[in-house]
Image (cartoon, grey):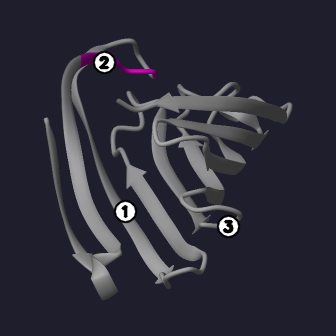
Amino acid sequence: FIAETGFKYGEQNGSVAKLGGYYHSGEYTRFSNGATEDGINTIYGVIDHQIVRTEGCPGINVFLRGGVTPEDDIATVTGYADAGVVVSNVLREDDALGFAVSWTDLSDGGAAGGRSSEIVTELTYQIPVSDWFTIQPDIQYIINPQGGGGDAFLTGLRAEISF
């Protein structure tokens, strides 16, 4: 079950704030003793604020998101927060350059060697090739992945076809 509310604000309603939560009714195993429990829930918030939107100039948005799951004995991820900036129309119309940093809190049962966290930095650039085809290269650097140490460097490429 998911519930979310939000509102648009700012000039031309270019900014949005949301508050939501969900409940998953599945069966979960407690990390501490192996007992099972029904259901897990999370609450989260999102702010996506438009700083600049001027015709013919790059647009700038900043975002902040976060969520918590109170059941740290059954949830692998108990907290999450990220923030970033997206600049649109950088080199061409409808492109987008983004940078973000995220932090994930891992519970005792979800982290290698006990409670820990990981940090991810990401740089991406979305390029419209045509009206129906977009590509998006992505670079990520992960500090302490899954709480187990040994930083990681990832690259990827997303392709989107729209009909």
Mark 3 touching mark 1, by CB under 8 A? Answer: no
Q: Is residue 10 visible?
A: no
**Which disc, if any, is residue 90?**
3
Asked whether 148 or 114 is in front, the reply is 148
Q: CA distance from mark 2 to mark 1?
A: 27 Å
Q: Where is residue 41, by image quadrant?
A: top left
In contact (CB < 8 Å): disc 2 and disc 3: no
| Front residue of 110 and 20 | 20
Of pointers 2 and 1, the one earlier in the residue sequence: 2
Mark 3 or 1, nearer chain start: 1
List x then y, in percent, for residue 31: 45, 21
* Mark drawn on residue 28: 2
Q: Residue at x 56, y 45 (%)?
A: 105
Q: What residue does disc 1 label?
A: 46
Q: Secondary structure at mark 2?
A: strand
Circle number at residue 74: none
Amino acid residing under circle 3? Val
Q: Which residues are magenta?
A: 27-31
- Give neighbour class at mark 3: few <14, some 14-19, many 20+ (Cα, 10 Å): some
The residues bearing labels 2 and 3 have C-alpha atoms spaced at a distance of 46 Å
Mark in the foreground, 2 or 3: 3
Q: Is residue 7 magenta?
A: no
